[in-house]
Image (tube, grey):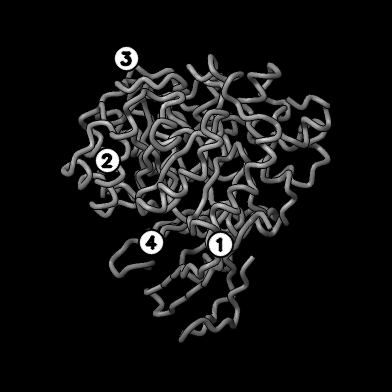
Amino acid sequence: MMNLRNKKIGALTVKKTGKVLKIQCGYNANSGSLASFVVALPVPLMVTITALGSLTALVSSVLLSRLVE
Amino acid sequence: MKIGKEGEKLNYRFENFGGIIANNDPPFLAFVNRDYMRELGLGESELWNTSDESIGLLSAPTEVHFSITEKCSVRCQHCYVDAGNQTPGELDVESLRRALDVLSEMKVFHIAFAGGDAMERPELFELAQYARSKCIIPNYTVSGINMNPEIAQKMRIFGQVNVSIDGVGEKYGALRPQGMFKIADKAVDLLVEAGVPTGINCLVTRSTFEGIEELFKYAKAKKANHISFLRFKPAGRGKRFYEKEKITHRQRIDFIPMLRKLSTKYSLNIKTDCSFMPMICYHRPSIESFETLTSYGCEAGNVLMGMKSNGQITACSFLNNAPNISIFDLQSALQNRNCFEKIRNWPKTAAEPCKSCKYLNICKGGCHSVAEYITGSLYNPDPECPFVAEYTNTIS
């Protein structure tokens, strides 16, 4: 879904060739069923994935958008 | 290799497509491809000895609903587990720790404590702490009973706590005990004040449907981080009220557009449970939009499993006719493909109209517990899906 190659996000240039296929946001407190976002505010959710071991920072910004449009 | 905050251990597992990486702040699971795992220096996996790199059947659930008791003093009329008294065979605390060890070995990322009322077990917080020590994030839904400032502080151990509130004030009590609203309301205040990520769980029934906007106003005023809307299922004591309280065909169609409108009006995020997926698909969203939000249809036995208080594993908390698999045998059952294979592979055998539906692989047939109750087989399409109802001319 999100090709991070050569994306510049903020001050960081993403050099990875890997892809984030999908991101499941938040925790589910329901003990009966699987609840997932279907309507979320269109504000940027900064999802930061930092690989400190290689001193490479990888930042992906996911714009949560409305599912039912 | 680290992820997220400095000092935090990278929590991940391999899958055929690459792997899943868990982050806690902000909370997310990232499903990444094989290159991504390699670039993180995580090596190779024997699960990659296949040309299939699609996200389908997982090696283990990402989330388990972890029931530790069936005891509950609230005794809601519609309880899906028929909770009330303690039942024989409940796992002791040592066995529950071992069960968490099993889930940790399988790299399950999240659990939701379940019951009954899990707070009836004095070991709840100890178990939650133990789960955290095993890199499993515990979550919890409460009625609000017995909440006080001290317990609210302890609730910070959970990643997310939701309070069950189906309606505001008198509308709370359609199926729940009258007088409980004030208790639930106080619990929301205490949890938010304690800094616990707090949401509202709303069971959508014919009685509560008209009060949904009022619930939005309430949740916004109380600073809840979202509302989760749950479909009423014909399970446990809920079967007695199902015909009276299930929402109508018209309400099923109107529900999602109403949520979207109210979410915008009140600036509040919304979750729905997996069983509402047919009602979402009916409005024909783009397939890509499901990927953006990772919204799930029926993932019973795959992304999700349940564990009963006696340690028996179920495909989900509403499907009780599962093969008799103990939590302690779950790993080998999954490895031997002897665990909920029919429900996990349901789209391959789906009947019409699901078979030809473009949302088949997202929705996966709607709620199979509803299908079982109404049609006698959990493998039939959900008859309350608006598409299915129109196809079979059984609009009700």
Q: Which of marks 2 and 4 precedes in the sequence?
A: 4
Closer to the camera in the image, A43 or B167? B167
The residue identified by callout 2 is B186
x, y percent for residue B61: 50, 42
Q: Secondary structure at mark 4?
A: loop
* In this view, the mark in front (4 or 3): 3
Residue B334 seen: no
Give the residue number, with chain letter if any, for mark 3.
B85
- Mark closest to the chain's N terminus, 2 or 3: 3
Note whether B330 is above or below B222 in the view shown. Answer: above
Amino acid, disc 1 = Val
Residue B172, image quadrant: top left
Q: Residue at x 46, y 42 (%)?
A: B63
Distance from disc 4 to disc 1, alpha carbons, whole Å, reads 14 Å
Mark 2–mark 3 distance (CA, rounded to whole Å): 26 Å
| Residues at circles 1 and 3 in contact by the CB criterion of under 8 Å | no
Residue A42, image x and y in percent?
A: 55, 66
Comes first in the chain, label 4 or label 1: 4
Classify residue A14 as left or right of residue B366: left
**x and y, in percent, of residue B360 in the image:** 74, 42
| Cβ atoms under marks 2 and 3 closer than 8 Å | no
Do the residues at discs 1 and 3 belong to one chain? yes
> Mark 4 to mark 3: distance in Å?
41 Å
Residue B197: assigned label = none
